């Protein structure tokens, strides 16, 4: 099945909450970094994509209707071109809060310290290279984040793009997708505290 929804928001912008929301709306399954560390073959596929000789999107996303979070957010433009009928969702949050969250979660691990770990190698290439591997340089990282968001807004046609904060809840998301608004609150999961409390093994650190 072709992708119907492409998430362009970087990790730690509520992407896991969005994944669950899309699946609750019947628009899943939704691909996320969580799927990468659950599939031993996936890191090599994404490294190949980064190197320009990937297996093809239909292979990576077989069985999925949506994708959010890294690693796919790095390639949002290529995906938007490959799936011209798909809608694009840019999840954002306050830049300072986003940076603090990355430092307490996904960037807390030194991926370069385990270069033989396929997951770490993939994260460095697909995520780390976006930031010139300067993941603790606040000014630089926030600059990359803000330029990414501006580029998405400039690249994707306005009628195809939802600029969205998950704190806005169901209404803008459901209006954009043309689906009924569910009862109850939006999913809110994978906070910094939840992320840290899970004690996820280093080779299985997802980027919500």
Image: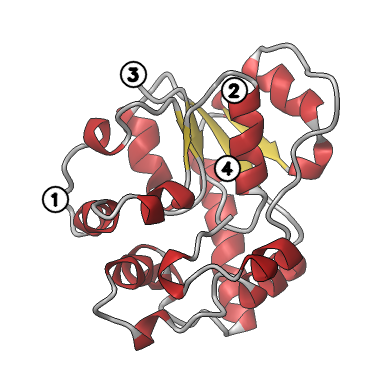
| Pointer 4 residue | 153
Q: Residue at x 84, y 32 (%)?
A: 185
Q: Where is residue 59 in the image (x, y as percent from the top left)?
A: 22, 34
Earlier along the polypeptide chain: callout 1 or callout 3? 3
Q: Residues within 10 Å of mark 2 (few under 14, many from 20)?
A: few
Q: Which of marks 2 and 1 is in front?
A: 1
Q: Position of residue 99 (x, y in %)?
A: 67, 71
Residue 154 or residue 12, whichever sits in front? 12
Residues at marks 2 and 1, CA–CA distance in whole angstroms: 31 Å
Earlier along the polypeptide chain: callout 4 or callout 1? 1
Q: Going by the image, does 2 lie left or right of 176?
A: left
Q: Position of residue 70 (x, y in %)?
A: 46, 53
Earlier along the polypeptide chain: callout 2 or callout 1? 1
Residues at marks 2 and 3, CA–CA distance in whole angstroms: 23 Å
Where is the N terminus found, in terms of image quarters? top left
Evaluate if marks 1 and 3 touch, with contact meaning CB atoms under 8 Å apart: no
Looking at the picture, does residue 170 appear above or below residue 153? above
| Pointer 2 residue | 159
Residues at marks 4 and 1, CA–CA distance in whole angstroms: 27 Å
Q: How crowded is mark 3: few (under 14 residues within 10 Å), some or many (20 or more)?
A: few
Residue 146 or residue 129, whichever sits in front? 129
Looking at the picture, does residue 184 appear above or below residue 13? above
Q: Which mark is residue 1?
A: 3
Q: How crowded is mark 1: few (under 14 residues within 10 Å), some or many (20 or more)?
A: few
| Pointer 1 residue | 53
Q: Which residue is drawn at 67% across and 49% down?
A: 14
Earlier along the polypeptide chain: callout 3 or callout 4? 3
Coloring scheme used: secondary structure
């Amino acid at each position: 099945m072709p992708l119907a929804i492409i998430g362009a928001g970087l990790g730690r912008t509520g992407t896991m909450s969005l994944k669950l929301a899309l699946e609750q709306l019947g628009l899943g399954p939704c691909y996320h970094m969580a799927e990468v560390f659950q599939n031993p073959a996936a890191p090599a596929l994404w490294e190949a994509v980064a190197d320009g000789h990937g297996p093809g999107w239909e292979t990576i996303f077989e069985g999925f209707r949506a994708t959010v979070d890294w690693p796919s957010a790095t390639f949002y433009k290529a995906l938007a071109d490959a799936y011209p009928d798909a809608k694009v969702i840019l999840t954002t949050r306050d830049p300072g809060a986003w940076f603090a969250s990355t430092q307490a979660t996904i960037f807390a691990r030194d991926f370069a310290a385990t270069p033989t770990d396929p997951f770490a190698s993939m994260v460095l290439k697909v995520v780390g290279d976006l930031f010139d591997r300067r993941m603790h340089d606040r000014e630089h990282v926030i600059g990359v984040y803000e330029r990414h968001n501006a580029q998405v807004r400039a690249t994707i046609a306005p009628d195809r793009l939802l600029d969205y904060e998950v704190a806005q809840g169901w209404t803008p998301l459901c209006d954009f997708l043309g689906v009924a608004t569910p009862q109850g609150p939006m999913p809110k999961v994978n906070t910094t505290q939840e992320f840290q409390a899970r004690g996820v093994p280093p080779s299985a650190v997802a980027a919500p």
